Amino acid sequence: MNESMNGPTRWWWVRHAPVLGCKGVIYGSNDVECDVTDTAHFKALAAALPKDAVWVTSHLSRARDTADAISDAGLPFGEAAIEKDLGEQNFGDWQGLSWDQMREQDGEAYGVFWANPTRLRPPGGESFADLIQRTADVIGRLTLEHQGRDIVAVAHGGTIRAALSVALSLEPKQGMALKIDNLSISVLEHVKDGLLRGAGGVWRVCGVNQSVHKG
C-alpha cells in the first residue's frame, strides 16, 4: 500500500476573489465576475498552499478564475477538476435581486423563508441544508479517491461553511454563523479512523478563515 494513503487527507478550502458589480444583491449561483487584480494576495496564496496537491473548483467562473490567478502567481497545478456540486447555494427566483426587491416580489414567501433560512428553500432554489448535503457527497467521494493527499478546493463562502459543517457535525443554523472572507484559507484534515459518511475516518479542523500575509 502507498504510504501516503496512511497519512491524513488535507482539504485546503479557498474562497474566491471578491465579486464585481453585485453590491447589495444576492447573486448565489449566478455566474458573476471576480476581481483578480490583487497580485500580492495571489502570490501570498501561492506561497501558503501546498505543492503537488489535487486541485478542484466549482463550475462557476469566479472559482476557476481565482484558481488560475493562484497558478499564475507561482503555484502551477495543471488542470483543476470541476465539481459542480461545490457551487454556491442556489437562491432560485431571488438571484440578482436586492433584499427590498425580494420582499416586493413575494412578501409572503420572503417572510416564511427568513423565519428559518437554513432549512427552507427560496422559490425555485435550495436550502443551506441542501448545500451541506451536496458538499458532503463531494467531500466523501474525493477523500476516498485521494487518501493521504492534499486537496485544494477553490469554492464559495456557502460551500466552505457547508464543508466546516460536515467536519464539525454542525446544524445548518450553526454552520451559517461561520464567517468566510474572500481569498481566505480554511484547512480540514481527515484521519482514517472511525466512521465518516461511508468514507471512514474523523475530521480535525486545522484553521478557519485564515488570511495570508502579503509581503
Image (cartoon, grey):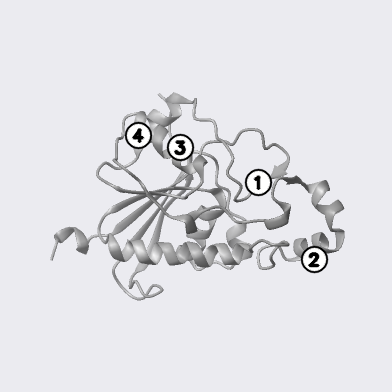
Report the side of 115 relative to 45 (left or right). right
Q: Residue 118, percent across and down? A: 66, 63
Q: Which mark is residue 71?
A: 4
Q: Earlier in the sequence, mark 3 or mark 2?
A: 3
Q: Amino acid at mark 1?
A: Tyr
189 on left or right of 91: left
Residue under the image location 33 percent in, 73 percent down: 200
Assign a secondary structure to mark 3.
Answer: helix
Mark number, residue 162: none
Q: Compared with residue 196, is residue 128 higher up or lower down, i.e. above or below?
A: above
Mark 1 / mark 2, whichever is N-terminal: 1
Quadrant that contains the N terminus: bottom left
The three-letter code of the residue at mark 2 reads Val
List the residue tagged with mark 3: 66
Task: Please provide percent x and percent y for residue 103.
Answer: 84, 53
Q: CA distance from mark 1 to mark 2?
A: 20 Å
Disc nearer the start of the sequence (4/3): 3
Q: Amino acid at mark 4?
A: Ser
Total labels drawn: 4
Q: CA distance from mark 3 to mark 2?
A: 35 Å
| Residue 112 badge | 2
Residue type marked 3: Thr
